[in-house]
Image (cartoon, rainbow, N blue to C red):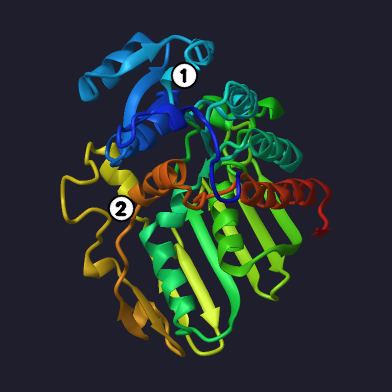
Amino acid sequence: MTGSTTDTGPEAGSAQGAPLRVALIGYGLAGSVFHAPLIAATEGLALDTIVTSNPERQEQARAEFPRVRFAAAPDDLWARADELDLVVIASPNKTHVPLATAALKAGLPVVVDKPLAGTAAEARVLAALADERGLLLSVFQNRRWDNDFLTVRKLLAEGELGDVMRFESRFERWRPQPKGGWRESGDPAEIGGLLYDLGSHVVDQALVLFGPAASVYAEADVRRPGAAADDDTFIAITHTSGVRSHLYVSATTAQLGPRFRVLGSRAGYVKYGLDPQEATLREGGRPGTSAEWGVEPESLWGRVGSGESPLTGGGRPEPTLSGAYPAYYAAVAAALRDGGPNPVTALEAAAALDVLEAARRSARENTVVTL
């Protein structure tokens, strides 16, 4: 079931205790930087096959994973589905729905990189198919395991901030020159732009913290010369809980704001800087090779307090919890092997897509959209 457990699938026939055999579709940024290293570092999982027809990417993958097999196309996987236990889809966004559908119909559990789909309706169809087949369908929302987000969850659970009134989340960059490629394409079929890219993260985090959205207002702009998709976007969510989330995703921010500012009735929490795990992975660092995985220096800790700006010494330092991206695939392995909970369900992804679709409509029509 997508919400909790997997009842059947090829893994049921695997030797007890043998690693679950994983096929990874796509070896671009998502596949090479995030999925392959995290899969390989997870006890109980084995990176069996990578699907890419690019010779340079094959060479890159073989250098790190010398025992991995290669397939030129996803159809090659369906023909030998009985040799696999999980398919991970890290290919361009427009391929997520058709590939996830094919994998599920081949009887294979699936992990899909965010966004799961272009629409909430498509996501719910996939969720229903997974339920019908009794297969795991999970969405890779790795930033639920960012160090700062885990710290916010801890502060809220402990009541340190009181009743939260406003949540501000920024995922800002300074990239004045577009990089090109499908992520910055203006073609709606590509599901590009920051709204669906970084917006998938910040919306998911807001819903995890404060519950369902009641209404959405958004502004989405194309700022950079030569850009074709939104590169400077703001989303305001009013949650049914009464909390207001203000979310910023941008490639045009010359001065970066705090990653989080959480304002409560008792205190606020302000945190600058990004979780270090992506940078570590890009630099070749791997989980399990150091006890310092996901740890940041005290100089980057956020501050909790009231009345005075943290930039002038207000509040007290709040130790940042260690980031924990490996926890996602550990949970996937436990779901497949032991019937543990799905770490990110397709229906949770559909709820985030409801917000993203509402944001797109709000920005286009300059209106507040009620959900």
Which residue is more in the foreground, 128 or 276? 128
Q: Is residue 257 above or below residue 63?
A: below
Q: Nearer the viewer, residue 329 or 252?
A: 329
For the point 66% across and 57% down, the residue is 235
Left or right of 231 in this view: 322: left
Distance between the Cα atoms at labels 1 and 2? 38 Å
Q: Earlier in the sequence, mark 1 or mark 2?
A: 1
Residue 199 versus residue 76: which sits nearer the camera? 76
Residue 130: mark? none
Q: Residue at x 81, y 53 (%)?
A: 366
Q: Residues within 10 Å of mark 1 (few under 14, many from 20)?
A: some
Residue 344: x percent and y percent? Answer: 53, 49
Residue annotated with mark 1 = 82
**Amino acid type of the residue tagged 2 in the rendering:** Pro
Q: Is residue 326 above or below residue 126?
A: below
Residue beneath the point at 71% across and 55% down:
218
Residue 247 visible, this orientation: yes
Task: Give the percent coordinates (x, y) of residue 58.
Answer: 32, 14
The quadrant the N terminus occupies is top right
Location of the C terminus by quadrant is bottom right
User: Looking at the picture, which amino acid does disc 1 mark?
Assistant: Asp
Label 2: few (<14), some (14–19) or many (≥20) C-alpha neighbours in 10 Å: some
Number of numbered callouts drawn: 2
* Element type where label 2 sits in the image: loop
- Which of the labelled discs sits on residue 276, or is there none? 2
Residue 12 against residue 166 in the figure, above or below: above
**In the image, residue 287 lies at what x, y percent?**
24, 45
Secondary structure of the residue carrying tag 1 is helix
Q: In the picture, residue 30 is in which quadrant?
A: top left
Q: Nearer the viewer, mark 1 or mark 2?
A: 1
